[in-house]
Amino acid sequence: MTLPSDLAIGVLRRPTAEGGAPHPMRVVASVVSRTVLGSMAGLLVWAQLPVAVLGWTAGVVQSGSMRPALAPGDVVLYQPPPRDRTPEVGHIVLTEDPTRPNRLLTHRVYHVLPNKSLITKGDANSAPDSTPVRPAALQGVARLRVPWIGLPVQLWRARQPVPVAVVLLGLATLLTFAVLPLHSRSPQKQ
């Protein structure tokens, strides 16, 4: 059996330092982009696993009212509230917003009233919320924070097209560097 001529002349050889070794910048770009994309994928899995397995709820922080504990773009995972216990002062909770129907609110429990209603307060706010949260409005108790992974969703909901475009361009750049071949396809010197 004879080999085709391109195989016979050594096209499948390992590249040597002088004739086809990967450029160091390509290697660095590939490693960095794959690391960032892998980390992002891990954070996405981390944010969705408790939702799928434990029945928790995930939400993206939309405002800075809970800074420094929670920042806009963070994903918070909430465990369903126990029906026989009231959250304690200091717990971060997800509730129906008592002042804005059909909106959810993530704040810290500031005070528990005798009727089990909650007074909440954002960490960055100067005063507690004025309207108590009924026990039936409690949706969950925060258990896990996944930083930044919800930033594209938060920017999209805030109708900020330029930052969304920058994020998408950054993701496209990372994907490009991750899939580029390390070796150039230019013909080797004979």
Image (tube, grey):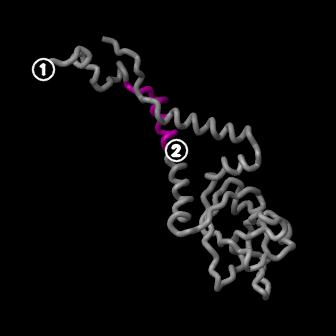
Q: Quadrant of residue 72?
A: bottom right
Q: Residues within 10 Å of mark 1 (few under 14, many from 20)?
A: few
Q: Quadrant of residue 115?
A: bottom right
Residue shown at 84%/68% (left/top)? 99
Residue 189 is left or right of residue 84, and the answer is: left
Q: Amino acid at mark 1?
A: Met
- In the displayed structure, 84 sits above or below 146; it is below
17 within the magenta span: no
- In the displayed structure, 163 sits above or below 97; it is above
Quarter of the image containing the C terminus? top left
- In the displayed structure, 19 sits above or below 176; it is above
Residue 68 is left or right of residue 1, and the answer is: right
35 within the magenta span: yes
Q: Which mark is residue 1?
A: 1
Q: Secondary structure at mark 1?
A: loop
Q: Position of residue 121 (x, y in %)?
A: 79, 70
Q: Identify residue for label 2.
A: 37
Q: Residues within 10 Å of mark 2 (few under 14, many from 20)?
A: some
